[in-house]
Image (tube, coloured by chain):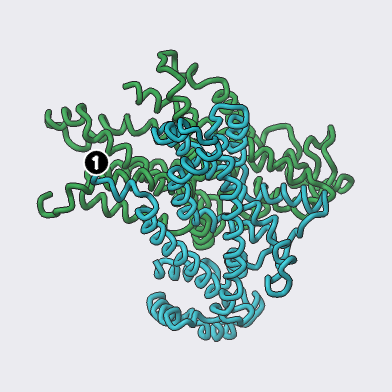
Chain colours: A green, B cyan
């Protein structure tokens, strides 16, 4: 400590940087609730007195509507193969670019393929990418953030430099470069989007760890001679995990949009696999005479992204209020 | 960072010489071409040579068109720059009044409607929003250009016409974020004593809001607007592709699709350098803009 004269004011300045840094990262790759939340949370916190009703009730109707939609979309993706729907790649040449009907709920595309079926199958890619990419970000980023926030000093600066280096690329540019470099398979798309989400989780986990690392129960555990590993897993992790998991719902939404963008550019999984993004991209040519081709997959994507955003945000709010009441 | 860019691009799967000449070309021809391109060299040697070129302004030429990378970048920089500038200005022009209004009547009808709308806009991916605008304006109403670009020097009106939809799309994505940020800052400012004093002096609401409260509330907005360039760049890549605007983003995507290595390296390098420099500038500006940081010791 004493070797560095600046050390004394470093923590506070770092914390300050984390505050703004998180916002910016939230901006850059997340773009959502990170910024919407402040105003939102203020109003909620000041008008809602701390109640002790059960968690599921405090989450409110809106949260559960979102959750139901997410589960529905997830199930559709998992069971796409066994659902009694038409084959997503079979063309019906008697019905090219036809509007919605009883036979084709969402109409057909320019090649006469059933859009409903394609959207359902496209759900697979979106959900797989959304969940697994964020899992990578959550586990890797969360772990690194915990280590950085708990041990501080040199290891922290190494980890934070790594996070900063990743953020030095605009998100989509990094993503494009990574996917081109890795090759366009589903695993690689997951990996690339996962890597892009890592620095966000590092910062969030570190910031949360910093606030807990100095709390009484951690100091008590240290005083009674617990080993660092035990303190991290038993004392710090349970407290850091909840906000991280709530935030990861919002990141799932971002990952889905990122995959959609890649698909739309034709740089995601090969075009033979239907994804929301490539259905939309294919419908671009027929926007004038068959807008439904673009409309339905866009709507499903919008609702899904919105559901993840709202659910994640609500969860964060509820958890924050609880923390404020402590 | 430059090395990361270079080696990442160099390690792309697929032999660019092979994909350029087509699968039928004889192997010796492919070998000769990749020798011309310097692909046979070690990554590190290739990197040093490339970096030397970058410093002297020679970043090689495109494999496909033979156009020098530097020249291609020069042609495309103004397009991207104009797009982002127009989008940013438009976003601030719309977001500031909305932010002020929603903060003044926080909890009111307009505030609640906007809060919902802002949340919805944020859930719309940029390319979907762009397609929606294309459907509404050019397709249904016959307004504005769908794609393509006219240089300002050739036809100023045509230039603006070709950039209206792209910049509106790009701006709409920012408006929600900016207005919400300004709103929450402004609500905090409106509770300060000096605002009450201004009101007590009998100043009109407009004077209080715009003359007294807006300036101290806008620091984090301006900072964010500067730091938001990364998202703006990401958005611009998609939007240039969607609207067929010949900017850096479209250059990058076409280079990826065509495995045009040197062009891709040049485009990525340019984007990253601009991004890093802007971030440094904004960091420096932050303390200039926000007096609270400068007086933190005294307070």
Indicate the position of residue B123 as horizontal and vertical percent values: 59, 40
Question: Which residue is painted at 76% across and 45% down in the image?
Answer: A293
Q: Is residue A8 left or right of residue A75?
A: left
- Total marks shown come to 1
Q: Nearer the viewer, residue B101 or B31?
A: B101
Indicate the position of residue B292 as horizontal and vertical percent values: 33, 46
Quarter that holds the C terminus of chain B: top left
Q: Is residue A97 left or right of residue A159?
A: right
Question: Which residue is painted at 30% across and 41% down in the image?
Answer: A146
Q: Mark 1 highlights which residue?
A: A150
Task: Give the residue at the far left of this rendering.
Answer: A2
Question: Which residue is painted at 67% across and 38% down in the image?
Answer: A300
Task: Give the residue at the far right of this rendering.
Answer: A94
Which quadrant of the structure image shows residue B15?
Answer: bottom right
Q: Image height check: is B224 above or below B74?
A: above
Q: Image height check: is B252 above or below A104?
A: below
Q: Is residue A14 left or right of residue B24?
A: left
**Element type at mark 1:** helix
- Res. A230 in view: no
Q: Image height check: is B234 above or below B216?
A: below
Indicate the position of residue B272 as horizontal and vertical percent values: 46, 64
Q: Image height check: is B31 above or below A76?
A: below
- Res. A54 in view: yes
């Amino acid at each position: 400590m004493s070797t560095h004269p600046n050390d004394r004011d470093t923590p506070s300045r770092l914390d300050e940087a984390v505050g703004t840094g998180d916002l910016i990262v939230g901006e850059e790759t997340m773009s959502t609730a990170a910024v919407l939340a402040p105003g939102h949370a203020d109003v909620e916190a000041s008008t809602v007195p701390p109640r002790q009703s059960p968690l599921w009730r405090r989450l409110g109707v809106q949260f559960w509507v979102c959750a139901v939609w997410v589960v529905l979309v997830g199930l559709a993706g998992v069971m796409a193969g066994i659902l009694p729907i038409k084959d997503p790649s079979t063309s019906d040449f008697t019905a090219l670019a036809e509007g919605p009907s009883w036979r084709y709920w969402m109409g057909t595309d320019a090649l006469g393929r059933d859009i409903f079926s394609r959207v359902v199958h496209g759900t697979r890619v979106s959900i797989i990418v959304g969940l697994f990419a964020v899992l990578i970000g959550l586990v890797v980023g969360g772990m690194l953030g915990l280590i950085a926030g708990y041990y501080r000093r040199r290891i922290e600066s190494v980890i934070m430099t790594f996070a900063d280096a990743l953020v030095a690329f605009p998100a989509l540019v990094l993503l494009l470069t990574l996917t081109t470099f890795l090759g366009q398979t589903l695993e690689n798309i997951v990996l690339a989007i996962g890597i892009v989400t890592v620095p966000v989780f590092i910062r969030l986990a570190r910031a949360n760890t910093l606030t807990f690392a100095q709390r009484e129960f951690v100091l008590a555990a240290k005083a009674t001679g617990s080993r660092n590993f035990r303190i991290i897993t038993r004392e710090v992790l349970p407290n850091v995990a909840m906000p991280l998991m709530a935030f990861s719902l919002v990141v799932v939404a971002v990952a889905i949009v990122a995959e959609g963008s890649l698909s739309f550019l034709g740089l995601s999984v090969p075009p033979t696999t239907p994804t929301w993004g490539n259905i939309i991209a294919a419908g671009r040519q027929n926007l004038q005479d068959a807008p439904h081709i673009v409309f339905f997959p866009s709507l499903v994507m919008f609702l899904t992204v919105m559901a993840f955003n709202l659910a994640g945000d609500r969860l964060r709010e509820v958890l924050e209020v609880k923390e404020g009441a402590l | 960072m430059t090395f990361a860019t270079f080696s990442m691009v160099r390690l792309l799967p697929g032999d660019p010489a092979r994909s350029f000449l087509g699968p039928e070309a004889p192997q010796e021809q492919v070998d000769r071409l990749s020798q011309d391109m310097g692909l046979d060299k070690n990554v590190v040697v290739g990197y040093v040579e490339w970096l030397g070129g970058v410093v002297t302004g020679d970043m090689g030429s495109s494999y496909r068109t033979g156009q020098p990378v530097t020249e291609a970048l020069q042609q495309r920089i103004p397009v991207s720059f104009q797009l982002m500038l127009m989008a940013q200005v438009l976003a601030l022009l719309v977001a500031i009044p909305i932010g002020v209004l929603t903060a003044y009547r926080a909890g009111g009808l307009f505030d609640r409607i906007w809060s919902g709308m802002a949340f919805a806009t944020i859930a719309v991916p940029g390319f979907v929003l762009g397609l929606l605008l294309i459907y509404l304006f050019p397709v249904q109403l016959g307004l504005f250009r769908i794609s393509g670009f006219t240089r300002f020097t050739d036809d100023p009106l045509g230039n603006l016409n070709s950039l209206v939809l792209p910049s509106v799309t790009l701006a709409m994505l920012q408006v929600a974020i900016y207005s919400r940020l300004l709103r929450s800052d402004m609500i905090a400012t409106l509770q300060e004593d000096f605002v009450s004093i201004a009101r007590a002096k009998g100043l009109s609401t407009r004077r209080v809001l715009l003359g007294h409260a807006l300036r101290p509330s806008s620091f984090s907005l301006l900072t964010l607007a500067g730091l938001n360039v990364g998202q703006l760049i990401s958005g611009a890549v998609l939007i240039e592709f969607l609207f067929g605007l010949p900017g850096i983003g479209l250059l990058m995507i076409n280079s990826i699709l065509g495995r045009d290595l040197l062009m891709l390296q040049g485009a990525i390098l340019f984007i990253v350098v601009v991004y890093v420099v802007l971030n440094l500038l904004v960091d420096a500006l932050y303390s200039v803009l926000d007096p609270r940081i400068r007086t933190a010791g005294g307070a």
